[in-house]
Amino acid sequence: MAQNAKDIQLRELKDLLRELRETNQLLRKTLEEAQKEKAVLRQERDNFKEQVDYLTKKLFGCSSEKGACEIPGQMNLFNEAESEMDPSAQAADMHASTEQPEQTEPESRPRKKRSTNEERFKGIPVKKVYLEPSADECICRECGARMEKIGTEFVRRELEIIPARARVVEYYSVNYGCKNCRRNAALPNIVKGKDGKAHMMYGMASASTVAWVVYQKYCNGMPLYRIEQDLGRLGAEISRATLANWVIKNGEAFFTPMYDFFHRKLLRRDFAMADETPVQVLHEPERRAQTKSYMWLFRSGEDDGVPIILYKYSETRAGDCAVDFLDGFQGYLMCDGYSGYNKVKTAKRLACWAHIRRYLVDAVPKGKQFDYTQPAVQGVMYTNQLFNKEEKIRQKYKTFDAIKQARLSQEKPIIEGFLSWLERQNPVKGSRLDKAVTYIRNRKEHLAVYLEDGRCSFSNNLSENAIRPFVVGRKGWLFCDTQAGAQASAMAYTMVEMAKANKVNPYHYITYLFEHQPNEKMSDNELEQLAPWNENVKAEIQRRIECQKNQE
């Protein structure tokens, strides 16, 4: 019996031990899963904190991508970027952040000279006012003799603004008839006075009035209801619906031929740039008012040709819009990272280094801008070096062949080092650095394309600067009511920005177009005579500006 009891007790202990082992394994497995879950939650927390820091910086921080201050000598860490391609240099690179870099004096730039009043007001006519003493003051108090003029002395200078005025011009035809023919002839002989200009403008507005409305909204960013109020203060009660019809109908009639001409000129160029931004159009067929539409911008590149800037309204952001607009274009296309531009098969894509730097700057952790062990900071240093080299090359060399050779000798090694750095990155999934690295890797084949020609652009900043007036104006007028209004806005912004890019007064140029009324029957040679880069057009607009100054 005792033996049996011991056997039973032994079996019970073995069963207990087995249960404890199973419980131990279960607890270990539970602990491992909890640790994994904790690590995932910790990473999600870090990603959310990173996102909060990023959005806070976007909302309240400085919008500049380059650091506000540079530590002297730190840029030297990556000056010899080609060493990244040498495997023997890998060990030295691991300790580069702990070594004290050579301190160099920051490059000093000449301070901008303060402009004088004569330079600030050189384009404004000067009216001289002479302050004469009274007749009694011109009598000498000592001897009673009348004083004589001995000279003038400058007292002060004032800037005077003459506000706009509105007036109604009524045209009357003065008629003449022959008395003899009226008595004796079967039909009277009558002559009527004519100015030789048919009124082709839509509405009762003159060319200058419609040009003023276009200038106020699309150059100064004033919505139509403010223009309506401004006209009311001048004594003209005109509704905003009437103003919109003036812009839409006259723009469609007289801007379209010039717009199509500029489009044909752009397609014949070898370098183009593009960008796009959302716009809200309230009344689109079978679409909700809240649906996003897009305003596209296409412009010429930096090839020393006349600047061409075109806006294009589209219901969607689909790449087919770029395909249709650039149909026939064969050359280099600079744009952002939007994949829709890949559909333009006839164009050779260029990568925008400003967008690459922007992604890397956004990936820098909060408070780590000068921690050079951070991969994002290292990437920013590479891009800053490229921007620094590009600026100096542009300043030093004036021919495109020289720019190309300088880029190959100075910037290509930096790009090779940057690509070597990029291959070694293994960021945490979902982090800002992971987004930046993914963005760059997806555009890896386009990074060095700009080295092929000195006329290629280094960044898409010109397009972003050209589309900025539309974005600023959108903050004022908020949306377009109809598709016709969106199309008219695209053509109006095109004419305004074309005038500004070619250094022509936008208001006088739009007035000039409305007066000459281009049409579809005109040839390209005739439309060339109305282009803002035409010297005759520039001379005529300058003459008008001088006449306006003299009248005032």
Image: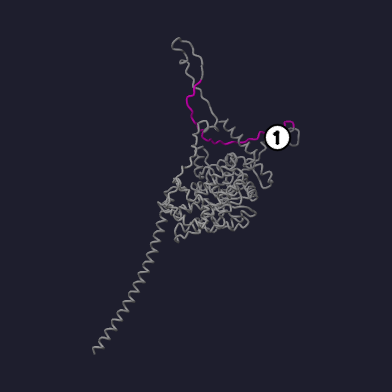
Frontmost residue, 188 versus 483: 483
Frontmost residue, 412 versus 204: 412
Frontmost residue, 185 versus 547: 547
- Where is residue 368? Give x, y as percent: 41, 52
Seen at 51% across and 16% down, the residue is 150
- Where is residue 134? Give x, y as percent: 47, 18
Amino acid found under the numbered disc labelled 1: Val
Q: Is residue 163 magenta?
A: yes
Q: Is residue 300 visible?
A: no
Seen at 39% across and 64% down, the residue is 39
Magenta: main secondary structure: loop
> Residue extending furthest front?
88
Residue highlighted by disc 1: 191
Q: Quadrant of residue 123?
A: top right
- Where is residue 234? Give x, y as percent: 51, 37
* Left or right relative to 19: residue 417: right
- Please determine whether, in this image, residue 353 is positioned above or below residue 13: above
> How many residues crowd mark 1 within 10 Å: few (<14), some (14–19), many (20+)?
few
* Left or right relative to 158: residue 500: right
Q: Is residue 266 magenta?
A: no
> Residue extending furthest bottom?
1
Give the position of the N terminus as an image quadrant.
bottom left
Q: Secondary structure at mark 1?
A: strand
Give the position of the C terminus as an image quadrant.
top right
Q: Which residues are magenta?
A: 152-180
* Left or right relative to 227: residue 179: right
> Residue extending furthest left?
2
- Where is residue 181? Give x, y as percent: 74, 33
